[in-house]
Amino acid sequence: MCNTLFLLLAALLPGQALAANHVALANDVFVERVTTDTQGKQRILLEEPKVVVPGDRLVFVLNYRNAGAQPADKFVITNPLPDAVRFADAGDTRPLVSVDGGQAWGQLDELTVAQPDGTRRPAQPADVTHLRWAFQKPIPAGATGKLMFRGVVK
């Protein structure tokens, strides 16, 4: 299981930012645990992933900061999904996704996957291999932000 965790953490590094900007990226991953307090109310806790097992829900957090003196224009973050993780969701950020190793991009409901018999079927979350956020507005100098997505350990 330690190898799985090591590979999972190594795969967190987002792909290169596709613009010549000075945007610093930092990544974190957490295991999402649901607990029940003494009043019976459920709480969601984010914990450091010391050990992960199949079925664990993970939360990936990508923090960015424009460390440059100028706005970062046309900034793109491309993040490969670790092989040991099935994509679950990205909240309301709606990144573009790829289901073919980063060759083609689109919204999940627009993509299809080739079948061995030559037919195509609608893409599903388990098919996602990469996520991409393309910033539509420049990131002001000094500005910070965060992107998140969830996955499930296979």
Image (spheres, rainbow, N blue to C red):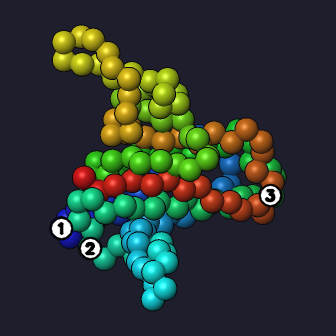
Residue 18, picture quadrant: top right
Mark 2, residue position: 51
60 above or below 125? below
Q: Amino acid at mark 2?
A: Val
Question: Which label is found at residue 86?
Answer: none
Q: Given contact means CB atoms under 8 Å apart, are the residues at marks 1 and 3 in contact? A: no
Q: Amino acid at mark 1?
A: Met
Residue 141 visible (yes or no): yes
75 above or below 5? above
Is tag 2's residue or tag 1's residue first in the polypeptide sequence?
1
The image position of residue 97, as x and y in percent, is 48, 35
Is tag 1's residue or tag 3's residue first in the polypeptide sequence?
1
115 left or right, relative to 64: left
Of residues 141 and 83, the one nearer the viewer is 83
34 left or right, relative to 143: left
The residue located at (38%, 28%) in the rendering is: 123
The image position of residue 132, as x and y in percent, is 53, 40
Q: Secondary structure at mark 1?
A: loop
139 above or below 108? below
The residue located at (18%, 12%) in the rendering is: 117
Q: Secondary structure at mark 3?
A: loop
Q: Given contact means CB atoms under 8 Å apart, are the residues at marks 2 and 1 in contact? A: yes
Query: Residue farthest to the bottom?
Result: 38
Residue 145, picture quadrant: bottom right
The image position of residue 49, as x and y in percent, is 35, 73
The residue located at (27%, 11%) in the rendering is: 119
Q: Given contact means CB atoms under 8 Å apart, are the residues at marks 3 and 2 in contact? A: no
Query: Residue farthest to the top?
Result: 118
What is the CA distance from the residue labelled 2 to the residue labelled 1? 7 Å
Mark 3, residue position: 141
Mark 1, residue position: 1
Which quadrant is the N terminus positioned in? bottom left
